[in-house]
Image (cartoon, rainbow, N blue to C red):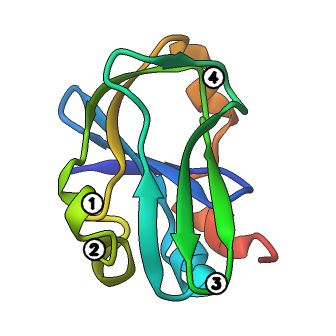
Amino acid sequence: MSRILYTKTHEYLREEGSEWYLGITEHAQEALGDITFVELPESGAEFSAGDEVATVESVKAVAGVMAPVSLRINEINSALEDAPEMINSDSQGGGWLAKVEALDASQLDGLMDQAAYDAMEK
């Protein structure tokens, strides 16, 4: 069973086994509208919590995707380069942006679980 943690800025980290997947939430992709382009980070890049990791462009806006915790990019979802609309159709599944490694696991405690995220005023 996977565990999903959320940020107040609508990013998520989904844990599956020993891997974490970074992406934007269902709410975020709905707010953006039709996504037309995604700029992904380089594999191996490291970011501090709060750094911009990627950008998502839609017909309405360009949004930065922030690192929920300090992390290293292990793999990017290269399928998004040709099909960024996957984020609209399955943002918290196949529309993930990158597989990441948390560099400071204690920072995960600062993220929200599903109940806290659902209760947050969006």
Circle 1 is placed at which residue position? 80
Q: Label 2, on which residue?
A: 86
Whether label 3 touches label 1, CB < 8 Å = no
Dot 2 or dot 1: first in sequence order is 1
The residue that appears at 33% across and 41% down in the rendered structure is: 98
Mark 3 and mark 1: span between their CA atoms? Answer: 19 Å
Residue 46 pos. (x, y %)? 50, 15
For the point 27% across and 57% down, which residue is it? 81
Q: Are marks 2 and 4 in contact (CB under 8 Å)?
A: no
**Label 1 is placed on what type of residue?**
Leu
Which residue, given by chain and number where applicable, does mark 4 sit on?
A: 107
Percent position of residue 5, x then y: 51, 48
Q: Secondary structure at mark 3?
A: helix
Query: Is the residue under label 1 in contact with that under label 2 (CB below 8 Å)?
Result: yes
Q: Nearer the viewer, mark 3 or mark 1?
A: 1
Q: Secondary structure at mark 2?
A: helix
Q: Position of residue 47 (x, y in %)?
A: 58, 20
